[in-house]
Amino acid sequence: MLKEIIVINGPAESGKDTFIELVNKYAKVINFSTIDKIKEIAKQIGWDGKKTEKDRKFLSDLKKLTTEYNDMAFKNTELAIKDFYQSDNEILFIHIREPEEINRVVKQFKALTLFLKRDSIEIIKSNSSDANVGNYQYDYVINNSTLEKLDEQALHFVLKLKDGIGV
């Protein structure tokens, strides 16, 4: 049975969640983000759920604070991975922005990395989490041009993972 951990990253609006939805047509997946718990905390202290430049910086800074305080995002990632291995799901996608956190997950859990890009999207520079999405040597890079091509790439990605061949 296929059991792969994939750290997925890319600029805002590059199609990460869409790609995961398409992969889910061909394999059983879990979509986990290290920022979800941060968003829950942010809502409790007044964040309205928007993603303006100011909001994105706030979420990035809050994640840094919780990482420094108690390594919350990594601990939640460890729990998600444990749950994944106990499930019948085949691929766990983990959204991580920060290169140093990507590296921790890669080293500790032998995760693969995937960068999704879209030529029409510019990388947000107002916070370090978004600004550094391209500052990692990813195992795989997928260019999102059309939904049809993205679907083809999702199928190709799953078939190669199942065959144990590089994507």
Image (tube, grey):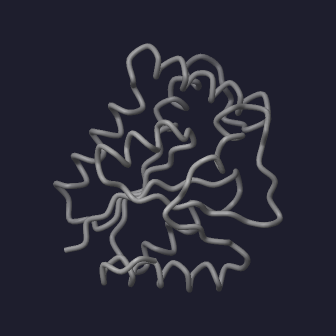
Q: Quadrant of residue 18?
A: bottom right
As displayed, is residue 113 above or below residue 166?
Answer: above
Q: Residue furthest front?
A: 137
Q: Position of residue 95 (x, y in %)?
A: 50, 49
x and y percent of residue 118 in the render? 73, 66
Tell me the residue at 35%/40% (across/down). Answer: 77
- Left/right placement of residue 49 relative to residue 22 reads right
Above-or-below relation of 20 to 101? below
Residue under the image location 69 percent in, 60 percent down: 14
Location of residue 55 in the rendering, given as x and y in whole percent from the top left corner: 72, 30
Q: Is residue 137 left or right of residue 89?
A: right
Residue 159 rendering spot, x and y as whole percentages: 38, 84
In the figure, residue 52 lies in which quadrant? top right
Q: Residue at x 51, y 78 (%)?
A: 154
Quadrant including the N terminus: bottom left
Residue at image location 64% in from the left, 84% down from the top = 149
Q: Can you name the residue that lies furthest to the top here? A: 69
Residue 114 sits above or below residue 60 on the image: below
Nearer to the camera, 125 or 139: 139
